[in-house]
């Protein structure tokens, strides 16, 4: 946490430095607005919409985890320790979507 | 950093002990690993939703002609279109949009509280924690309203019961006016599990607010983790709170939009 100013011995409190936080907020708000536009304008087909939603969700998740949860600024080994296990979820998505399709075909 | 350089010279790896390879305090690491396990829980719920949805037929017609039926999976924007005080109007996804905004906003005030904690600014931490608690409580209230509306249903009811042929009003774990019963079940389980996380988060946030107000984090004799700073408890609970916001981003996409 070297980049953060600490309380010095005189008891002076450092000035807040929040520009980056608000920048992230506007990005999150903008993407959410875009999601609503895509959902309600009906200009694309449903399948295109789904791809757009997933891309925008991953971008939002990246900003929340990277900036708000500060993971982007942690040690590389910690970043990998958190992100790599999520590969199991990708496997689960593929496995269960195929399973769901199989149930649908057999019904 | 000095220890890392020394161990490298003596031919030992940074994993041989005597330093912090992750450069984070014990408590913060444990919070991260807990959140990783919690991410698996929520992933399982959402992926299970995807599987069940894929095993049901999708609605084929246009959105204007959509009618509730147990024959196909409903379009979410036709299910979630009610807003408090505007009863009877069709406002697709407006209320869930407001809820999303409230949760993102409370995540922002949480980061601001963490930032104030890094500066050991007690007054600012108090102020931003209070806003965060308010945001969390407002979200919970909104969710309570949404559940009530979902359970009571629309005035004219919806789908016909596949066994009795009668019109179903509202939804519970056995009957569902909006579509297949599992749609309502997943709504209750996923938003309920998330809502319970928000509830726990509000309690934890209140605890942090209380400790800050009582000056506990400013006490010079308080023992803290090696490598941690005095207000790190705000940061740890902040991680949890952002995770709750993160989960909502995914619930919002996969339950309300797709």
Image (cartoon, coloured by chain):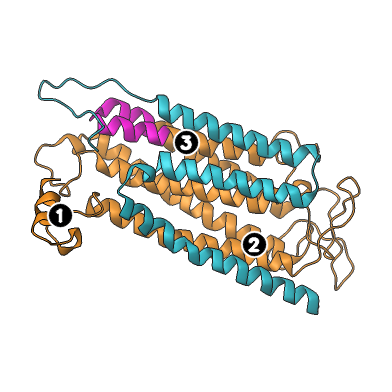
Q: Does the magenta stretch include residue B123?
A: yes
Label 1 vs label 2: CA separation? 46 Å
Label 2 vs label 3: CA separation? 26 Å
Chain represented in cyan: A
Of pointers 1 and 3, the one earlier in the residue sequence: 1
Residue indicated by mark 1: B19
Of all residues, the one furthest to the bottom in this rendering is A106
Q: Where is residue B216 in the image (x, y as percent from the top left)?
A: 19, 38
* Up/down of A74 relative to B26, above or below: above
Dot 3, crowdedness within 10 Å: few (<14), some or many (≥20)?
A: many
Disc assigned to residue B106: 3
User: Which residue is drawn at the image coordinates 73% and 71% (left, top)?
Assistant: A101
Q: Circle 2 sits in a helix, a strand or a loop, which is it? A: helix
Residue indicated by mark 2: B186
What is the quadrant of residue B174 in the picture?
A: bottom right
**Residue closest to the eye, B38 or B187:** B38
Q: Are marks 2 and 3 on the same chain?
A: yes
Q: Where is residue B258 in the image (x, y as percent from the top left)?
A: 70, 52
Q: Circle 1 sits in a helix, a strand or a loop, which is it? A: loop
Dot 2, crowdedness within 10 Å: few (<14), some or many (≥20)?
A: some
* Up/down of B203 relative to A34, above or below: below
Chain represented in orange: B
Magenta residues? B109-129
Q: Where is residue A3 in the image (x, y as percent from the top left)?
A: 26, 32
> Is residue B210 visible in the rendered structure shown here?
yes
Q: Mark 3 lies on which chain?
A: B
Q: Are marks 1 and 3 on the same chain?
A: yes
What is the quadrant of residue B171 in the picture?
A: bottom right
Q: Mark 1 lies on which chain?
A: B
* Up/down of A15 relative to B186, above or below: above
Query: Would residue B164 appear left or right of A84 to someone viewing this image?
Result: right
User: Which residue is drawn at the image coordinates 14% and 22% (left, top)?
Assistant: A11
């Amino acid at each position: 946490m070297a980049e953060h100013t600490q309380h010095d011995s005189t008891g002076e409190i450092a000035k807040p430095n929040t520009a980056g936080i608000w920048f992230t907020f506007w990005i999150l708000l903008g993407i959410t607005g875009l999601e609503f536009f895509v959902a309600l304008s009906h200009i694309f087909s449903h399948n295109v919409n789904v791809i757009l939603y997933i891309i925008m969700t991953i971008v939002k998740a990246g900003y929340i985890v990277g900036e708000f949860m500060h993971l982007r600024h942690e040690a590389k080994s910690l970043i990998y320790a958190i992100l790599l296990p999520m590969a199991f979820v990708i496997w689960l998505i593929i496995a269960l979507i195929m399973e769901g399709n199989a149930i649908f075909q057999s019904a | 950093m000095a220890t890392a350089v020394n161990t490298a010279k003596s031919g030992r790896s940074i994993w041989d002990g005597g330093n912090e390879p992750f450069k984070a305090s014990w408590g913060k690491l444990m919070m991260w690993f807990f959140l990783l396990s919690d991410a698996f829980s929520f992933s399982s719920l959402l992926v299970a939703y995807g599987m069940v949805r894929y095993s049901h037929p999708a609605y084929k017609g246009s959105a204007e002609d959509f009618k509730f039926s147990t024959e196909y999976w409903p379009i979410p924007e036709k299910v979630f279109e009610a807003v408090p005080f505007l009863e009877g109007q069709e406002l697709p996804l407006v209320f869930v949009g407001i809820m999303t905004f409230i949760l993102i906003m409370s995540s922002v005030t949480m980061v601001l509280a963490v930032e104030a904690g890094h500066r050991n600014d007690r007054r600012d931490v108090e102020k931003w924690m209070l806003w965060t608690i308010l945001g969390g409580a407002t979200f919970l209230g909104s969710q309570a309203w949404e559940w009530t509306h979902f359970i009571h249903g629309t005035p004219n009811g919806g789908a016909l019961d596949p066994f009795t042929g009668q019109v179903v009003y509202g939804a519970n774990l056995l009957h569902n006016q909006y579509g297949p019963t599992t749609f309502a079940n997943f709504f209750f389980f996923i938003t309920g599990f998330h809502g319970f996380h928000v509830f726990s988060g509000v309690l934890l946030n209140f605890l942090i607010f209380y400790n800050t107000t009582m000056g506990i984090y400013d006490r010079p004799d308080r023992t803290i983790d090696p490598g941690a700073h005095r207000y790190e408890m705000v940061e740890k609970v902040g991680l949890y709170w952002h995770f709750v916001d993160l989960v909502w981003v995914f619930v919002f996409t996969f339950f309300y939009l797709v």
